[in-house]
Structures are given as C-alpha cells and as structure tokens.
Image (spheres, rainbow, N blue to C red):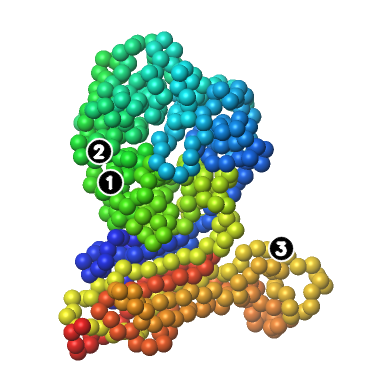
Amino acid sequence: MRHPPRGVADTLDGTNSPPGAMSSLSNLIPDPSTPFCFQCRPAAVALTTFPAFSSPGVVSVAYQLGTRIYGLIATARNTGHDEPFVYDIPSATFITVSGVTSGNTPVTQASAGAWTPPTMTLVSTKILVTHPGFPGSGTNFGWFDISTLASPAWSAGNTATNALPSVPVGVQQFGNRAYFSMSNGQVWFSDVLVPTTITNASNVLQVGDNTAPTAMAALGLITTSGGIVQGLVVFKNTTVWQVTGDVATTNLSLNNLSPAAGTLAPRSIANTPLGVLFMSNDGIRMVTLTGSVTEPLDGVTVPFRNVSIPSRVVAAYNAGVYRICVQNSQAIGAPYQDWWYDQPKGIWTGPHTFRYDVAVAYNSTFILFSNATGATRTLWQSDPWQVLTSSFTENGVQLTWTYQTAPLADLGRLTANSAIETTINVAFGSGMTSFTGTNWDAFTWGNTRWYGITTFSPTQQLSVVASDESGTVLSQAILTSSSSGTLWDSFNWGGSKWGSSISGLRPYSIPWTKPLVFTKLVILATGGSAPGLKVSNLQVLYQPLNYVP
C-alpha cells in the first residue's frame, strides 16, 4: 500500500477519495522540487512593533503600494480612534503622515464580532479608505494623499458636487474611477482620476435588491474576440454581479453572474492569475476570467462551511498561494486555522497555526497583522516557501508539524488487515540553527564542535502513531536521525566529516512495538520544524486476516 501525500481533503474514508488524501499537513508546505513531498513552513517574522506610536493596538486595514504598507492602527494619539500609518519595508522606517486629527480619523472598532471591514484602494494620487468608524455628515471616508511620496498627507470628507448619502460600505478602483458601495445596494462612482468628486448625479448603479454589497474586486475578462477587458465584480450575500464599460463610452453594463452564490466574507476575496477567489457559503469558489462562477474547489470545504464569523475571515494571494485564515467552529475549541491552497498544484495544506486578521501581498511574500494575544501591534512577514534565512520559531515558540493520513484505503478487501512492516520517506535536516564561531584556545579540546555552533540539534526525532478509524491507538514509535557535528580532537584526521550530516530523502522503517490490526489505518507523524526536513511517501505492507471485522 503506497500512500503519496497529495494534499488535505475533507474525507472519512481514503477508499472513496483521491489517492494521497491527508487529514492534516499542518505547518507543512509543498517542496518546490519534488511532487508529493513536503517541507516545513517558515515562521512568520516580526518586522516592527510600532515603537513610535502611543499605545499601539489592532491594525484594522492595510494596503501595499510599492515598498510601503499604508494602513490604520488603533492608538492613543486620538483616544478611541484609528491612526493612519505608512511603513517602508526596505528601510524599516515609518513615514510621517501629516494632517491627522481626531475629527478626520475613524472611531476604532471592536476586534471581535461581526463587522463591516474597512477597505482601501488607489485612484490617481489618493489611497481611499472606507471605515465603519467614520461618523458621516460630511466625514464619510478618508484618504492618503501621496502626490508627494516623501510626505503623505491624511484627509477625510465626502465627495464634492454630489455627496455620498451615507458612509460607504467599501471602495474599489475601476476604470480610473472610485466605485463606492452603499448600504442600500447602490454603487456610486466618481469622476475619472478625481476620486473625491461626482460631477454627474446619475453616476449610480443599483445592484440587485436594496441589500448592501459585501465586497468588490477588479477582474480582467477574456472576451470572445480574444481580447482582455477590465471588469468590476460586485459581491452580495448570495449573488455575484459584473460591471463592464464606462459612462464616457456609453457602454456601461451591469450583469448578474451568479444568482445562487455570493459571499459574507469580504476579506476572503483575492485576485489570482486565473480569476478572483472568494469564500462562498459552501467553500472557496472562483470568478474566472470568462466571467463564470465555478463550483467550490476540491479538497477542503468543511472549515469554510463552519466559520464562526464570516466577516472576520481574511485571505490573500501571492506567489501561487491563496491563504485564508478562518475560525473553525467545527473543530474542538473553535481554533483559528490558516489554510493554504497551492493554485499551480491544485492542493490544500494546513491547518497552519499562525492567526492573522489583515493580510496583504508584498513582493513574493505576505505582510500580516494579528489580533492574537502576543501577536498584536506587530507587522509580520510570512514567506510562502523556505529561504536561507528562514526561521522556525514563531512568536517565541518553536514550530511543530503534523502529517496525518486520511483513513487509508482498504484495498477492496472484506477481511480485517494486519501490518508489521511500514516505512515513511523522510529527509532529516542538519539541525544547525546558528553559527557564531569559537575563538582559538577558548575551549577544552574535545568539548567544542568544529564550527563553533552554539545552537545545535545533535539528533532529530519524529513520533509516529498508528490508530484505527475511531482514533484508537494501535502502536507508537520514534524515528531518530543523528545529525551531530564532530568534536575537536575526537577523531583521526581524514576519518570524520567537517560538519553535521544531512540525510537525503529515503524510507525509514517505523519500529512498531506490536503488529497493527485494523480495518482502516491512520498514520500520524509529528516533529519539530527545521530547515532541510522533508517528509513524503508512506508504505504499508498489508496482510489480510482470515476474519471479517
């Protein structure tokens, strides 16, 4: 029985599922070099803790432009209000934002419970911000004026000439105009390249009924003639609409793409090369480049059907990875779970263990903000793959990984099964985590390693548990691989290696303490995250028994 781990799936029976179905690949991500092989997820790394801000709290919204992150954070500068910020990543500095007052900043919202998430978009030289904390009555939305990048300025107000009738639900750029979604189901749109002015009072679309749109997203559309045109996708609770054209070219059009699928999770929406992904009530769907709405993605749907508060769901897409953080009410303790969908491979991994409440793509990585205890007031960088500088300690805690199969296929047999011989393909990393060097004559011969490695794991272990489909433990085992360095003066020259050994990917026999007897078998492997560690195929030698369970 060969089980190559393909990806996570919601299944109770591997017999009736695609080959390689896994119940968990927690803190494991696809190895970029080898199919059905997984390596450890790099830890999220703190870039800044907002040191110059007064009592910094929760970040409510963020937007990436160039090398900078623009956003709003709760502070004591104007008590009870969010404060605009601009952070430049390469220089690791905050850029001063002028014009901030208590009168033009929104009231800080609760960090728990249902809400209307703030939104941001760029139109011309203004980054517009909608926020439910704006009071209205002329202060309906805000914006960063980035006409001079070195000195961004903050303002707030309402559209000129024709004012928005209330605080907008969201904003999105389309056709160089700002499209504002309103609570009565209307979408108002500004003049071209002048996002704070609506000259024509007829710049309004009624999107379906009078319920508020939940979100908007830009989408390139493939036309029948083979060209690409820009479109705006407007989401409501149970419908998806498409806006194309413009009033200036007399071809503005509104069409219903889906009468039966929408979203209650505005921040689940993410643009990808193949279309716009979003969380519907039955899983993750996509609005494709042809304007159609797909069925839910294969594999994982249960966590998305059982979200505690959909409006708190957060997602982002970058470097081929769609990642979405949800609070799964179906799981014990209703934990926050980070699920990753590898779009090129079409597989899910997770649930990963870092909670975030705001996420934006930046270069080939992600910038995250979290409301979790010990993680708030921090700007985090989370890489979608390992690099030479990857860390595996996250928020002060060493990461661990979980590899758990779905109940393995029964091979179509009527009888119970037994297994004694089982192997799992593993590559143990070196275990080296830091190099500081050792001064000559500063140690006792035979007590210091060749490189002066002060943090060194001489062995790596992973524990393996076999259980049946009900969770009854059948046997347990420990796999250990030595990766120790070589002590000075403890070997003959030419008789030992310079540094620690690094094993290649190969099968290791699992030393069960007794034969496994089962109808359905589940294998769980866990270990500490480390560079170079990889885990792949599982092989089980089945022996049919002479009785029916």
Going by the numbered disc 2, the residue's amino acid type is: Thr
Numbered badge on residue 11: none
Q: CA distance from mark 2 to mark 3?
A: 58 Å
* Viewer-proximal residue among 269 and 308: 308
For the point 56% across and 57% down, the residue is 394
Which callout, 2 or 1, points at the residue further toward the start of the chain?
2
Query: In this picture, is 420 found above or below 159?
Result: below
Q: Quadrant of residue 158?
A: top left
Judged left or right of residue 76, residue 203 is: left
Query: In this picture, is 158 found above or below 297?
Result: above
Judged left or right of residue 469, residue 148 is: right
State the image coordinates of residue 467 (x, y, percent, origin top left). 35, 77
Which callout, 1 or 3, points at the residue further toward the start of the chain?
1
* Viewer-proximal residue among 35 and 361: 361
Numbered badge on residue 281: 1
Going by the numbered disc 3, the residue's amino acid type is: Thr
Residue 518 visible in the picture: yes
For the point 20% across and 36% down, the residue is 259
Secondary structure beneath dot 3 equals: loop
Q: Are marks 2 and 3 in contact (CB under 8 Å)?
A: no
Q: CA distance from mark 2 to mark 1?
A: 9 Å
For the point 54% across and 23% down, the residue is 104
State the image coordinates of residue 455 (x, y, percent, origin top left). 66, 67
Reading the image, the residue beneath label 2 is 238
**Mark in the foreground, 2 or 3:** 2
Going by the numbered disc 1, the residue's amino acid type is: Asn
Q: Are marks 2 and 1 in contact (CB under 8 Å)?
A: yes
Residue 364 visible in the picture: no
Secondary structure beneath dot 2 equals: loop
Reading the image, the residue beneath label 3 is 436
